[in-house]
């Protein structure tokens, strides 16, 4: 209940930067726990309906624990941000010291949550650049890539237009993970992953894809130097992504 909150928790939940600053400047701890067991940072991120980077930075500057977990051990601010596909807040949390690989009670990492959001390409790149463990396994034994494949297969079995869109979003995450070094699953029915595995590695598949597209354009543009055509293909096409 909002009435059970301290003013700092209310300010955090509402994203009221000025009120939050006043509370911190008056000496209130940035890690004071509400009756629900949540700290201000949880309220800032979990109820965010707009960019709350300023609130995150205020709490970080005041010494807030950026990796504080909820009472049940399930969530941290970074997990909330990954779940809600909020890349600007994620970047602010990571810059302030949030643990990029802190797990929830089911061993999900922020990267698992970003995969599950279906809209997480930017979030995934931010996590990878911050050192996210690409092959961490959750309680169900899945790595982020395996979770991505599983979700795409589920969407493909659906007949709804919305799930068709989500399936394509999941497929577009594959090369982001593979390019960063995610391990290929031992078994899969996914056609794209099977092609990558047949090539021996993502790097081999990407190179073969580039060669194939380049060869096609060389036939159409015989007057251009092959290296120029190759560079244009590298720049203009999502080589290895399909």
Image (cartoon, rainbow, N blue to C red):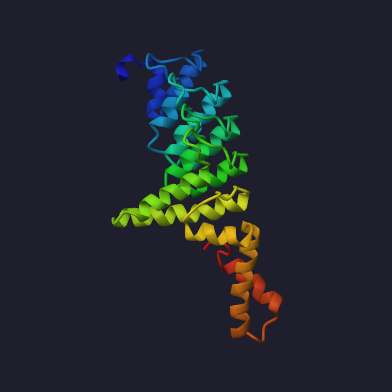
Residue positioned 44% across, 33% down in the render? 80
Compared across the picture, whether 77 is left or right of 232 comes to left
Q: Which residue appears farthest toward the front when viewing the image?
A: 187
Residue 95 placement, left or right of 169: right
Above or below, 23 relative to 76: above
Give the residue drawn at x 55%, y 38%. Answer: 91
Between 215 and 146, the one lying in front of the other is 146
Residue 119 can be seen in this image: no
Image location (x, y in percent) of residue 154: 37, 50
Q: Residue at x 57, y 20 (%)?
A: 63
Tell me residue 96's x, y (percent): 59, 30
Q: Position of residue 100 (x, y in %)?
A: 57, 34
- Which part of the image, by quadrant, shows the N terminus? top left
* Residue at 47% from the left image edge and 26% from the top image edge: 105
Left or right: 142 with respect to 226? left
Residue 35 appears in view? yes
Above or below, 55 against 237 in this view is above
> Would you identify the image quadrant in which residue 72 lies?
top left
Total numbered labels: 0
Give x and y (percent) for residue 220. 59, 84
């Amino acid at each position: 209940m909002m009435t059970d909150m301290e003013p700092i928790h209310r300010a955090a939940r509402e994203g009221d930067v000025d009120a939050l600053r006043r509370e911190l400047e008056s000496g209130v701890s940035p890690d004071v726990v509400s009756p629900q067991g949540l700290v201000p940072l949880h309220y800032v991120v979990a109820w965010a309906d707009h960019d709350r980077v300023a609130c995150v930075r205020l709490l970080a500057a005041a010494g807030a624990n950026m990796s504080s977990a909820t009472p049940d051990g399930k969530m941290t601010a970074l997990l909330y941000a990954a779940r809600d596909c909020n890349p600007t807040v994620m970047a602010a949390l990571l810059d302030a010291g949030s643990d990029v690989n802190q797990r929830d009670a089911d061993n999900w990492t922020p990267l698992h949550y970003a995969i599950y959001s279906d809209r997480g390409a930017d979030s995934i790149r931010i996590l990878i650049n911050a050192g996210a463990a690409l092959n961490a396994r959750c309680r169900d034994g899945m790595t982020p890539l395996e979770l991505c494949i599983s979700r795409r297969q589920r969407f493909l079995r659906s007949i709804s237009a919305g799930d068709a869109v989500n399936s394509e979003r999941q497929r577009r995450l594959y090369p982001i993970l593979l390019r960063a070094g995610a391990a290929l699953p031992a078994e899969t029915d996914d056609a794209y992953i099977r092609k990558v595995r047949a090539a021996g590695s993502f790097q081999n598949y990407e190179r073969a894809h580039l060669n194939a597209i380049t060869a096609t354009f060389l036939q159409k543009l015989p007057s251009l130097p092959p290296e120029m055509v190759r560079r244009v293909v590298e720049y203009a096409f999502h080589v290895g992504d399909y």
